Amino acid sequence: MQLPVTEGRVTELRLLLNIRTWEFANRFVKGQAKVGNDKLHLLGGCLSEGLASEFIGFCAIYAELPTIEQICGNPEGMPMPGEPSILYALSGSLANHATADRMDLLMKFIFRMPIEFQIVTLRETVRRKKEMLQVPAIQKWIATQATELF
């Protein structure tokens, strides 16, 4: 018996294939200290050369990111990355892990970022969780930075 091929079924099959393909690529690179261009051809056979190149770039950025635990443990002493791509990825990570309980610590670190990345981080934080706009640490940032921004 042949299953009818509907648009939804095709989408589902593509998603399944993509999940399996990405999981295979993930298993291949997991545990490696560095995923460099030497892996491009092997990953390219799995993902395609273009996606493999992007994935290697992603892995390079990810390897440079401090963890949220490291940031919360030493928000004023943690070295600040200088590379814009790393700062942008860090902005997303901070926004994703932001909670009202840890925002005071995170804001000490965020306040050290270049102003454009402070804005990106807090805009994304509030976009994900509207209630974060009421957190005192964010309110304080708005009050202090409003005069410089407007």
Image: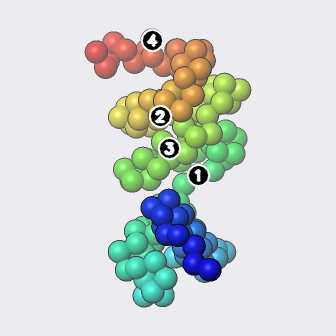
Position of 84 relative to 146 (above/below):
below
Is residue 96 visible in the rendered image? The answer is: yes
Q: Which quarter of the rendering shows the C terminus?
A: top left
**Mark 3 closeness class: few <14, some 14–19, many ≥20 residues within 10 Å:** some
Distance from the alpha carbon under mark 4 to that under mark 2: 18 Å
Q: Residue at x 40, y 79 (%)?
A: 48
Q: Residue at x 47, y 34 (%)?
A: 124
**Kind of element beneath mark 1:** loop
Seen as rendered, the residue at the extreme front is 1
**Kind of element beneath mark 2:** helix
**Residue 143 is drawn in which quadrant?**
top left
Q: Are marks 3 and 2 in contact (CB under 8 Å)?
A: yes
Looking at marks 4 and 2 on the same chain, the residue that comes earlier in the sequence is marked by 2
Looking at marks 3 and 2 on the same chain, the residue that comes earlier in the sequence is marked by 3
Distance from the alpha carbon under mark 1 to that under mark 4: 28 Å
Q: Amino acid at mark 1?
A: Pro
Q: Residue at x 53, y 70 (%)?
A: 4
Q: Looking at the rendered structure, which numbered label has been put on residue 124?
A: 2
Q: Position of residue 46 (x, y in %)?
A: 49, 82
Distance from the alpha carbon under mark 1 to that under mark 2: 19 Å
Q: Nearer the viewer, mark 1 or mark 2?
A: 2
Looking at marks 1 and 4 on the same chain, the residue that comes earlier in the sequence is marked by 1
Looking at marks 1 and 3 on the same chain, the residue that comes earlier in the sequence is marked by 1
